[in-house]
Amino acid sequence: MNSAHNWGNTRYGPNDNMADKLPQFAIFSTSWQFPGKGQQFIRYGRTARIPKIRANFTRGDGTQLKDKMKQTKWFDRKFEFLSEQNNFPSIMERLEGTPIRLQYKVGQMAKEHVRVKLGGKWSIQENIGHLIDLEPIWQGRLDDILGGAEFLRAADLENKKTDAADHNKKDIGQLLRGFARIRQKTLDRLGRLNETEIYKYALHPRLGTPMRTMDLFLFVAEHDDHHLVTIRQIYEQLTTKPKPH
């Protein structure tokens, strides 16, 4: 049996700018189909079937490991940037993959779930909007490093921009496309750097540690993953049935 989630008038098709940026993954159509064991996508006018993938968090005793794991709050995270190896290509791969993973996750969700605020916290849409809101900070910090600044520019630690943006009133497709576009601008700049620029640094204003270009964008990749996990946790809270007593 097929089920479809329609997102208003939004269409993710081969004419969207994103189609040029996601050559190895499916470009979304207005509806999502679930034929048999696979998920059907539209890719450049062709149909591609990609399996639905879910991580297995089950322990040997049958309990759910994910129920036991609590994600550390972002501002409680500690970072040590000690590697002298050039891991920048792998970091760029992670950064490029975030819009793809976001779209895959959202494509499995019903429309009514993406705007729900649990306990007054950000909804799924607002988490996506937050990634858009912070991308200019990452781009600006790159300017700081390359320009020889002593300190990186400070971020808004209260996230006032995201709170004021009212991302829940926006179309989910608009947010996904917006993030893919602004992230591509970041990637285009990073792809033009040389190795000397990758190892240049400035001091992080909150952590008080030197942050090279390579470290900065590892930090960004970790921040991406933090919000991807948060989005998954919100969705699971909304869709998991309570266990009978």
Image: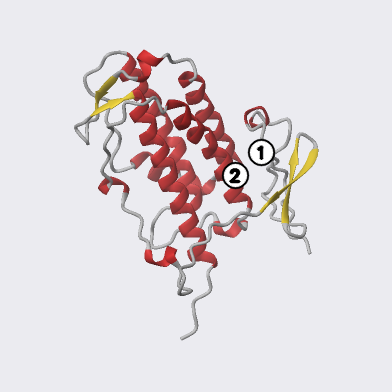
Depth check: give the residue in front, 198 or 134.
198
Image coordinates for residue 54, horizontal then vertical, percent: 57, 57
Badge 1 crowding class, 10 Å Cα cut-off, few under 14, some 14 to 19, many 20 or more, is: some
Q: Is residue 6 left or right of residue 142?
A: right
The residue labelled by disc 1 is 25
For image coordinates 56% across by 33% down, the residue present is 180
Q: Is residue 123 above or below residue 160?
A: below
Which numbered marker is on residue 103? 2
Q: Is residue 185 left or right of residue 86?
A: right
Q: Is residue 113 left or right of residue 208?
A: right
Helix, strand or loop at label 1? It is loop
Image coordinates for residue 187, horizontal then vertical, percent: 50, 25
Q: CA distance from mark 2 to mark 1?
A: 10 Å
Q: Are marks 2 and 1 in contact (CB under 8 Å)?
A: yes
Q: Is residue 62 above or below residue 220?
A: below
Q: Is residue 102 left or right of residue 217?
A: right
Circle count: 2
